[in-house]
Structure formats: structure tokens, C-alpha cells
Image: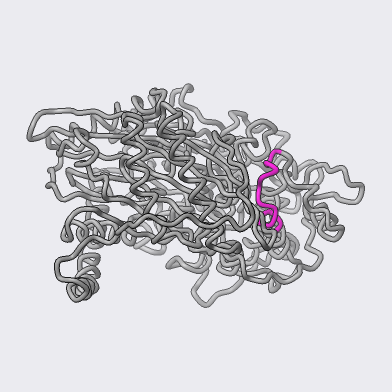
């Protein structure tokens, strides 16, 4: 969903401009380590130094506050630690429909990322979809009125509604006011969700979903007052928009035309009558007052237009230098480096990621069995915690691993160059005492296939999560193909190589088989075909021809699996369909696509959006690579409601290998070892990747 960002402050003009500048820079310059935060605000109350008492207090809170919030029935915690001048006040709040585990993970991630985004800043706030966090040397806990409640983050769905906007806005007002009342008066969590259907003259009959929340320590009157203040702002920012949200420290709300919260709504609203008039908006001045009128505002805007890029460039330099300095701290003299490479810059980028074996032994409790996440043909994966409390997944390659040293070098060189929120992040590497260890960011929801194809767990993937996963994979592939400094063909995109974080944001993993292309290169040929049956493009599987369109084919298979919940190559009821692509095409031509949608999806799931995904999937698996869209085009199709999609032709049907295709999915997070009967090697030298970087 495309979002527009803005900031709002009820204070005097200089504070407002400072807050706006801080948010603007944070959004445009957030480094990859920022994860998937919605935004952050770095305060102006001073800085602390490395290894200071203030930093130690933050680290202690980072270890205790996530547990306090996740163990609380209200998913809320605040704390005070230390003495002036090193006292730290902190607050963490998780969304009311979040489970305890996800809450703790989110707050932990927030502590890690905000210290990078607001490096050595004594006052910092960060927002995520599932949680928010603030710590400060100022006692903002004493009174919400003095704690920055006027500073909010505004996220706007830029898509306009199809219904008459006055009718839609009126329905949104009814929904949000009712949700706010429920949160204030009927929930100890100060949390409410609601759904509302309404009729329009054009028979669109859309459904709207709403959420409202306050911190649970607020009295009902205070909660209602806080929500009323930010609800009034919707007239300026969200009129005629399909969705929007405003996030403040003490209260927040959101509405969309699709279900975005977990579980059923706490409140079901009746449909208003057709053409119900919109309520008269309250007189609200959401623009901070200025003493000099319009001229002063114009001058201020010109000053900002000049100074913001300069400040942004300075901060970008500081962030880059800080990242380099932190990486250098991990290196120690005498560590073994990786094998020689033809490109010294590649080795330099890898050497900067070297981590001591002793550090990883301590992080994993000497590779204790209790920390093992799973095991596959390459070896085992262990969960670990670094000294800075960062959670990691350590891939320990066995001596008999099918990932040879060339694939290892390839994966390291490529992943070290890639920085995108939808690509798994390489934290470090260790080559000591005959150990080959790859260290990745930890992904608490494991790989997509472990949930999507599990009869019970698949219920966790509602349509909102699935559509977010599809969009995230598409953005990650576009970065690899078109937006990164190097053009990369993944060659092994599949459900088990898509990892999910605590909020089900997808990250593409496993670059052991990836290939680097020149800027003017479009395709290549290999006599050693590698990848996974069921996801391989036909021109690659049969002739060894691969290009970015080979990845597009794999994405098409993946999107069809996500929508239907069926593996490509499974057993189906149709007598004619031998694979998923055949099954989908049969129902496409018969006009019965809804019959093959995943039965675990709610009947409230947006039918048009689901059908569009099937349509895009079929376009991606066309037989002729030239007929498959670029990933940038796919992203436009996914985000736009006005783009007309061409009709697909009969898709290419994947080559299946008897006795093999059903075993192509990695067992890393299932805790099962591969047996000898599951060898991925074929007689015609087609190999199957089982790598699971975490």
C-alpha cells in the first residue's frame, strides 16, 4: 500500500519545524538496519557517549522492557532506570491484537533499531505496525500532555475511493468514532476494532475496517480526548482516501478497506442508509499558528527547501561512517580471511563481516541442541544472541555440505552488496578451526512454506498478510533485477527461500545459486542447471537459458501458491490437472477461480484483489519469456486499481520429476534431517538447492 508521510505538532512553530525535519530525514535516510519501522523521531534533549552510564541504562531496559510488555495482559509497560543525569524513562506499547511473543520480538527489535537510527541520542521514538517505543532523559511519563502527544506520524493510503467520497467519509467517521468509544469505555487494554459495511448509489457496497488504541494507563476520558484530537485531523489528510492511520505516543487509529487486524472485530456496526449525509466536520486548525501570516510560512518553506537537503546529506555521511565504524569493531587481528577473489573489493566487503568463533560459540551456547532451529543437507541452523542482544541465526555448514566453497563465496559476495528490507540481511561470517559459519538476522516466523502449506498454521495467514507477502517479494525482486547497483538473477526463488519476520514481512534468502549480470547483459546460458523443480522456467530447465524473466516465472508460481494455498506439483481433484499451473488455467478458462482459493481465507477477503493476483501470476508464467512482465511492471499492477491487465495465454507447464518434486522444500525449520533417499541430485545433473540462510 502506497503511503504518504507527514508530521503534526501542536506546539509553537520552531518545535513543529524541528519535528517535521526530523521525521522527514528519518524516512528518507533510514539505513537497511532499520528493519520495517514505520518511522522514528530523534529528540533534541542531548546525546550520550559510548560505554556511558546512560547507554548502560538503555541496554538494561532493552533486556527487561520487552519481557515486561509481552508478559503484561495489556501488552504495555513503562519503566524508569538510573539517577539524574543518567536517568532513562521508557515506554513500550504493542497493538492490542498482537500475541505475547510477537510483542516481545517487536519491542526488542525497536530497541535495536532506534539506537542505530538515533545513534547516541538521549531521546528517541520509533513506530512499528505492531508496537511503539520511546525512551528519553525527560520525564515524559509524568503527563501525556507534556510527553509529545502533539507529535504524530501520519500515514496515508494514496488510493482514492471509488464510492462518492462524502458518503465514504461519513461512514469512516461513524466507524472511527464508535471504535474510539469502544476503546475508551469497554476495554481494559484501551483497544478496539470494528467493521462496517455501507451501501452506495453505485452498488459498490464496500466494507471498512477500523482500529483505535490508547495506552492502557489512560483514564477513559483521557483516552477519548486523545483520540478525538487525532480523529479531527482526518478531515485534512484522509478525505476521499481508501485508508489512513495516525500514530501518536499515547493514542492511534487506522482504517482500511481490507482486514488488517488479527481475529474478528470487537464491534460490528450496522450499515448506514444509502446516501447518508456526512457529519459536519468540527472546526479544527491542524496547521500550527504562525505570527507572521502566509508570508512567514512561505519564507520558512523556502528555508526548509534549501536546508533540508544539506542536513540530509550530512546525516547520510554520519550514518555511513557510523556503520563502517561499528563493523570495524567486530574485526580482530589474526582472523582468517576468505579464499582469494578476483575482485579485491569483494574480499574487503566480506572481511568487514568477520566474527570470532568464540563470539558465536557464546551466542549459541556452544551450538547447544536446545538452540537448534533445524537441519538440512548443508548442516544445522542455530539461534543465538550476540553481546549487544541482537538475535541471530547461525548456519553451520557441515563438512559434507552440498554448498561448496564457490557457492559460499558467491553467497557472501552477493549478500554483502545487497541492502533492502525485503532481502535477508547478512550479519557476519566465521571461518575458523575448519568451521564455516554464516550469520543472518533471525526471522521468528521461519520460512513461508512452513506456514502456507501447514493445515493448521495457514490460518495465521489472512489475506492482508498474504498480500503484504506478495508485495514484499515483488519489491525485493525488483531491487535485485532493476534497482540495485548490480543486476542479480536469484535462480532459486521458492516458498522455503522466503523468510518471515515477526510482522510477516517477507525477506528473500539463499543467494548461493544467484548470478551477477552486467548492466547491459540480459541473459546467459549454463550447462549445469540448478534450482528447484516446480519453480524453474521451462527455457532454463530444458536449455539452461536464464535471465531475470526466469525469476519472474518463479515469482508467478509463488504468487499462485500463496493465493491458493496449494503446492505446485501436489495432488488435485481435477482429472486433467497434474500441477498447480494446469489447475489454475482450467479454472481461469471456466471462470471458477474462487473455487480454488485457499479455504482458510475469510469470506470477507477482497475478491477483486485475489483475482488480480491470480491474473498477475498467470502473466508471470507465460511460456515465452518476452511475454512475462518486468518486476517493476508487476509492482505497478499490484499497487494500482486502474491499470488494465492483458489477457494471459495458456501458461508454460513445469517439468516435474517423479519422486522428487514433492521433496524440494527445505526442512531447516521443521527440525527434520534429510535422508539419503531425498538426494536432490538428478542423473541429468539438475541439482536442487536446500540452503536456508537465516
Residue 123 rendering spot, x and y as whole percentages: 20, 44
Residue 686 rendering spot, x and y as whole percentages: 70, 52
Considering depth in this image, is 185 or 264 the residue closer to the camera?
Answer: 185
Look at the image and tell me whether residue 428 can be seen.
no
Q: Is residue 193 left or right of residue 667?
A: left
Residues shaded magenta: 600-611
Considering depth in this image, is 659 or 434 the residue closer to the camera?
Answer: 659
Q: Is residue 602 magenta?
A: yes
Task: Return the residue found at the far right.
Answer: 575
Quadrant position of residue 524:
bottom right
On screen, residue 614 above or below 458: below
Residue 399 rendering spot, x and y as whole percentages: 52, 37
Q: Is residue 670 left or right of residue 680?
A: left
The coloring applied to the image is one colour
Residue 569 rendering spot, x and y as whole percentages: 77, 46
The residue drawn where x is 11% and y is 34% is 86
Q: Is residue 544 magenta?
A: no
Q: Is residue 421 left or right of residue 452?
A: left
On screen, residue 668 above or below 566: above
Amino acid at each position: 500500500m502506497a503511503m504518504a508521510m507527514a508530521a503534526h505538532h501542536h506546539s509553537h512553530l520552531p518545535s513543529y519545524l524541528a519535528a517535521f525535519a526530523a521525521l522527514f530525514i528519518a524516512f528518507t535516510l533510514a539505513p537497511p538496519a532499520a528493519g520495517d519501522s514505520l518511522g522514528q523521531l530523534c529528540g533534541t534533549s542531548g546525546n550520550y557517549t559510548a560505554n556511558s552510564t546512560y547507554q548502560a541504562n538503555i541496554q538494561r531496559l532493552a533486556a527487561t522492557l520487552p519481557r515486561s510488555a509481552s508478559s503484561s495482559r495489556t501488552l504495555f509497560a513503562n519503566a524508569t532506570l538510573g539517577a539524574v543525569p543518567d536517568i532513562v524513562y521508557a515506554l513500550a506499547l504493542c497493538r492490542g491484537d498482537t500475541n505475547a511473543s510477537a510483542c516481545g520480538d517487536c519491542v526488542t527489535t525497536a530497541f535495536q533499531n532506534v539506537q542505530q537510527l538515533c545513534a547516541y541520542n538521549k531521546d528517541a521514538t520509533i513506530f512499528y505496525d505492531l508496537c511503539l517505543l520511546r525512551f528519553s532523559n525527560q520525564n515524559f511519563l509524568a503527563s501525556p500532555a507534556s510527553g509529545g502527544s502533539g507529535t504524530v506520524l501520519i500515514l496515508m493510503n494514496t488510493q482514492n475511493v471509488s464510492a462518492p467520497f462524502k458518503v465514504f467519509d461519513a461512514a469512516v467517521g461513524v466507524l472511527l468514532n464508535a471504535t474510539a468509544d469502544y476503546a475508551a469505555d469497554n476495554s481494559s487494554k484501551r483497544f478496539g476494532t470494528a467493521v462496517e459495511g455501507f451501501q452506495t448509489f453505485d452498488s459498490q457496497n464496500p466494507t471498512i475496517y477500523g482500529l483505535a488504541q490508547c495506552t492502557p494507563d489512560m483514564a477513559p476520558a483521557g483516552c477519548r480526548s486523545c483520540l478525538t484530537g487525532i480523529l479531527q485531523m482526518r478531515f485534512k489528510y484522509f478525505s476521499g482516501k481508501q485508508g489512513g492511520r495516525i500514530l501518536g505516543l499515547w493514542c492511534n487509529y487506522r482504517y482500511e478497506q481490507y482486514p488488517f487486524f488479527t481475529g474478528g472485530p470487537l464491534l460490528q456496526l450496522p450499515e448506514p442508509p444509502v446516501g447518508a449525509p456526512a457529519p459536519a466536520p468540527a472546526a479544527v486548525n491542524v496547521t500550527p499558528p504562525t505570527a507572521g501570516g502566509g508570508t512567514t510560512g512561505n519564507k520558512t518553506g523556502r528555508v526548509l527547501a534549501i536546508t533540508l537537503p544539506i542536513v540530509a546529506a550530512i546525516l547520510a555521511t554520519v550514518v555511513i561512517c557510523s556503520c563502517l565504524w561499528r563493523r570495524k569493531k567486530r574485526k580482530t587481528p589474526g582472523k582468517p580471511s576468505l579464499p582469494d577473489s578476483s575482485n579485491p573489493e569483494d574480499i574487503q566487503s566480506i572481511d568487514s563481516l568477520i566474527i570470532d568463533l568464540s563470539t558465536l560459540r557464546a551466542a549459541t551456547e556452544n551450538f547447544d541442541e536446545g538452540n537448534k532451529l533445524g537441519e538440512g543437507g548443508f548442516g544445522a541452523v542455530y539461534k543465538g544472541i550476540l553481546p549487544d542482544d541482537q538475535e541471530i541465526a547461525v548456519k553451520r555448514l557441515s563438512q559434507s555440505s552440498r554448498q561448496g566453497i564457490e557457492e559460499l563465496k558467491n553467497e557472501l559476495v552477493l549478500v554483502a552488496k545487497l541492502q533492502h528490507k525485503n532481502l535477508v540481511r547478512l550479519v557476519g561470517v566465521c571461518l575458523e578451526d575448519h568451521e564455516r559459519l554464516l550469520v543472518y538476522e533471525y526471522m521468528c516466523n521461519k520460512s513461508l512454506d512452513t506456514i502456507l502449506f501447514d493445515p493448521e498454521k495457514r490460518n495465521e495467514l489472512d489475506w492482508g498478510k498474504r498480500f503484504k507477502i506478495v508485495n514484499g517479494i515483488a519489491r525485493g525482486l525488483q531491487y535485485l533485477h532493476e534497482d540495485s547497483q548490480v543486476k542479480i538473477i536469484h535462480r532459486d526463488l521458492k516458498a522455503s527461500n522466503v523468510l518471515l519476520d515477526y510482522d510477516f514481512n517477507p525477506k528473500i534468502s539463499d543467494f548461493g545459486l544467484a548470478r551477477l549480470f552486467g548492466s547491459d547483459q540480459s541473459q546467459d546460458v549454463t550447462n549445469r542447471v540448478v534450482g528447484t523443480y516446480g519453480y524453474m522456467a521451462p527455457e532454463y530447465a530444458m536449455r539452461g537459458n536464464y535471465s531475470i524473466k526466469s525469476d519472474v516465472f518463479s515469482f508467478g508460481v509463488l504468487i499462485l501458491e500463496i493465493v491458493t494455498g496449494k503446492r505446485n506439483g501436489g495432488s488435485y481433484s481435477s482429472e486433467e490437472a497434474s500441477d498447480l499451473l494446469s489447475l489454475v488455467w482450467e479454472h481461469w478458462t471456466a471462470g471458477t477461480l474462487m473455487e480454488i482459493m485457499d479455504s482458510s481465507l475469510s469470506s470477507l477477503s477482497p475478491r477483486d484483489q485475489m483475482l488480480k493476483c491470480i491474473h498477475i501470476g498467470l502473466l508471470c508464467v507465460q511460456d515465452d519469456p518476452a511475454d512475462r512482465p518486468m518486476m517493476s511492471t508487476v509492482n505497478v499492477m499490484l499497487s494500482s486499481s486502474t491499470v488494465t491487465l492483458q489477457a494471459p495465454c495458456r501458461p508454460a507447464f513445469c517439468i516435474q520429476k517423479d519422486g522428487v518434486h514433492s521433496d524440494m522444500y527445505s526442512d531447516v525449520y521443521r527440525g527434520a534431517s534429510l535422508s539419503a533417499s531425498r538426494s536432490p541430485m538428478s542423473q541429468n545433473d539438475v541439482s536442487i538447492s536446500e540452503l536456508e540462510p537465516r
